[in-house]
Amino acid sequence: MSHRYLVVTGNSYERGESIGKNWSDGIITILKSVENAALSKDGMTLHQWLPHAKTFLPFIREYAPSTLEEMEGMAVGCDLPFDDIFLLACAYEKWFNHHAPEHCTAFAAMGDASKKAELICGQNNDECLHHWAAGQLDGVIHHRNESGMETLIYTHPGIPAYMGMNSTGLCLLWMALDNGERSSGLPTNILIRETLQHTTLKSAVEYIKKVPKTVPNSFLLAHPEDGICSIECSPSFFCPVYSNNILYHANHIIDEKMALNDKKKDDPTCSTVSRYEAVESLIEKYHGQIDISLAKKILSDHTRYPESICAHPRPDAIYSKTLASMVFHPGSGSMEIAFGNGCEMPYKTYSFLNQKIRNRTECVNLERCLSTGS
């Protein structure tokens, strides 16, 4: 089995333990990489930051108990102290205060915007090379829980989740934004993992709305039956926008009230406006034609290079690039991902073991089952 792909089954703890056992080398490498990156940011190691990170624990216990069990199992599986896995899951919050030029472009298309009216979601994950071992250890975790629900998650070893799709049709994409707010709450990568256990767009949106947030974020949620929702949120803001055909996002804030303190839009080293305008133009150009092939083409676009959707190192962002380019297609139960820039690397397909997406009745019944813990 490739180190890029791991299938895990059972309850939350068992799946976490399997991740820890099979990806132990990668988790240890990423932990060291993150420690070095954290130290370079502010002179404080990840472990020195532990007392602050522990202020998040009450929120994790209350709002993400199953993800907490995964993390506990992961620690045992890779024979590391729980604090190490916990700190990895919270690392994003530590260096959020420090400059990072690129942080992703994403879109979701369905209805009259896509070629067959099917939901197609695409995203580039753009990050700093030295934070994550240059993305060489990134992979896909294929969860299958006791209820039979499956989830395909792209992430770095040791991190609960970055982006993903589950077998009920729910897709979740994630982009960074910043209005300056910080608070104690549920760490971002744990929030994402827990959200992907929901089975409908409505319940996923309600979950993100209710949980206390640590930092600002943008989430693009989509479901083939429910539509698309773009969420801009922070500790004091929750701004959802719905569509039945197309939504897209980069890293600047769209909501007028939340955007009053936008830290990224006017940053001369941030390409967010350029990428947003490029994806907007491409979406308009290909409206009604978008399929998996065109989604890959959009993600590999170099319009306005070097400030393009497909991100490569440039003079004012030498360590920043696209670490992964991914397309989600719930209709076929598949995720296609290029580990690296989509213009350079081949896409590989990962599919659910049971490729049939559940219908509405099955989703509702599964939601009830999960909420009662049965």
Image (cartoon, rainbow, N blue to C red):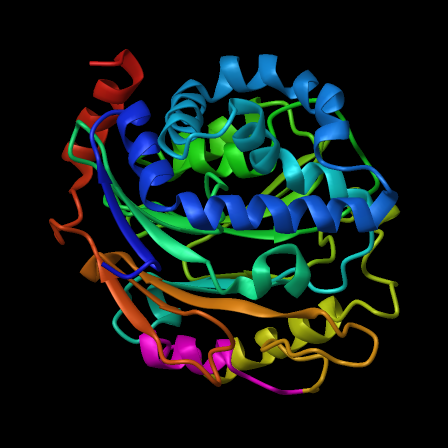
Q: Identify the residue shown where x is 84% and y is 40%.
A: 180
Q: Residue 356's x, y, as percent?
A: 12, 51
Q: Residue 204's x, y, as percent?
A: 43, 34
Q: Give the quadrant of residue 294.
A: bottom left
Which quarter of the rendering shows the N terminus? bottom left
Q: Identify the residue shown where x is 25% and y is 25%.
A: 11
Q: Eyeballing the image, is 257 above or below 174? A: above
Q: Residue 108's x, y, as percent?
A: 44, 61
Q: Along the line of sight, which residue is nearer the eye, 74 or 288?
A: 74
Q: Give the quadrant of residue 304.
A: bottom right
- Does residue 233 appear in the picture of this structure? no
Is 219 positioned to the left or the right of 348 in the image? Answer: right
Total labels: the figure holds 0
- Does residue 351 appear in the picture of this structure? yes
Q: Along the line of sight, which residue is nearer the eye, 122 or 241?
A: 122
Which quarter of the rendering shows the C terminus? top left
Q: Residue 138's x, y, as percent?
A: 45, 58
Q: Along the line of sight, which residue is nearer the eye, 318 or 46?
A: 46
Is 262 positioned to the left or the right of 232 in the image? Answer: right
Stretch in magenta: 287-303
Q: Identify the residue shown where x is 51% and y is 33%.
A: 190
Is 79 positioned to the left or the right of 292 in the image? Answer: right
Q: Give the quadrant of residue 369.
A: top left
Q: Identify the residue shown where x is 29% and y is 32%.
A: 15
Q: Eyeballing the image, is 27 above or below 234? A: below
Assess whether residue 8 is covered by the magenta stretch: no
Assess whether residue 292 is covered by the magenta stretch: yes
